Image: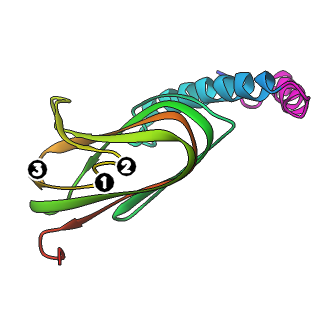
Amino acid sequence: MKSWLVSPIFWVFLCILICLMFWRNKAVPKYIAKWLNRAGARLQEISANFGACQGMAVYKSISAIVFVFLPAGEKDKFTLKSCSGFIRYGGRFYESGIYKFILDTQLSEGRVKVILMDKKKQEILKLSPGSFAGQIELNAKDKYYVYWEFYEASGTCELCWETGSTIK
């Protein structure tokens, strides 16, 4: 089966969409961002069938002009521009114990909320700019989900965590 990514029709269509992004109508970039997010989610589903990217971005629905996600070690960082929607991804914490979570938001507008969920997708910790830190005991054998919710947010957000052995 030939991949749709190799199709010249796909690339011509993508170039036309990118050209439309520079049009003066502000609704066009948001529409294109929605379309590209749906296409990216579909590509991720396809790649998951081949064993790639398992468990990273499980579920998302984002409408944004700019949406950059940088997961790194013991922190996740987002750079946003006019972002609304949510993203939920799974992960494991490799050490059992008490974890301290800190949400650092530097938003010029909008709001953000972060929820840590257990394997049954039940809320166990909720962070927002008003309640930006929390501690919880986590088991290394269990899987957890991080759920971010954005409301017309622009700026940067960072979620950091540290284990009980490194908490000061």
Q: Earlier in the sequence, mark 3 or mark 2?
A: 2
Label pair 1/2, CB-CB below 8 angstroms: yes
Q: Which mark is residue 46?
A: none
SS category of the residue bearing label 1: loop
Q: Is residue 23 magenta?
A: yes
Mark 1: few, some, or many residues within 10 Å (few <14, many ≥20)? some
Residue 38, given in percent of the width and then of the height, sits at 59, 23
| Amino acid type, callout 1 | Phe
Q: Is residue 19 magenta?
A: yes
Residue occupying the point 82% across, 28% down: 14
Tell me the residue that label 2 is attached to: 129
SS category of the residue bearing label 2: loop
Q: Nearer the viewer, residue 1 or 19?
A: 19
9 on left or right of 135:
right
Tell me the residue that label 3 is attached to: 141
Which quadrant would the N terminus be assigned to in this image? top right
| Amino acid type, callout 3 | Lys
Q: Nearer the viewer, residue 52 or 2?
A: 52
Q: Which of the 4 quarters of the picture holds residue 88?
A: top left
In magenta, the rendered stretch is: 2-25
Q: Which of the 4 quarters of the picture holds residue 42?
A: top right
Label pair 3/2, CB-CB below 8 angstroms: no
Tell me the residue that label 1 is attached to: 132
Which mark lies nearer to you, 3 or 2? 2
Residue occupying the point 32% across, 48% down: 130
Q: CA distance from mark 3 to mark 2?
A: 30 Å
Q: Earlier in the sequence, mark 1 or mark 3?
A: 1
Mark 3: few, some, or many residues within 10 Å (few <14, many ≥20)? few
Residue 47 seen from this side = no
| Amino acid type, callout 2 | Pro
Residue 111, given in percent of the width and then of the height, sits at 47, 39
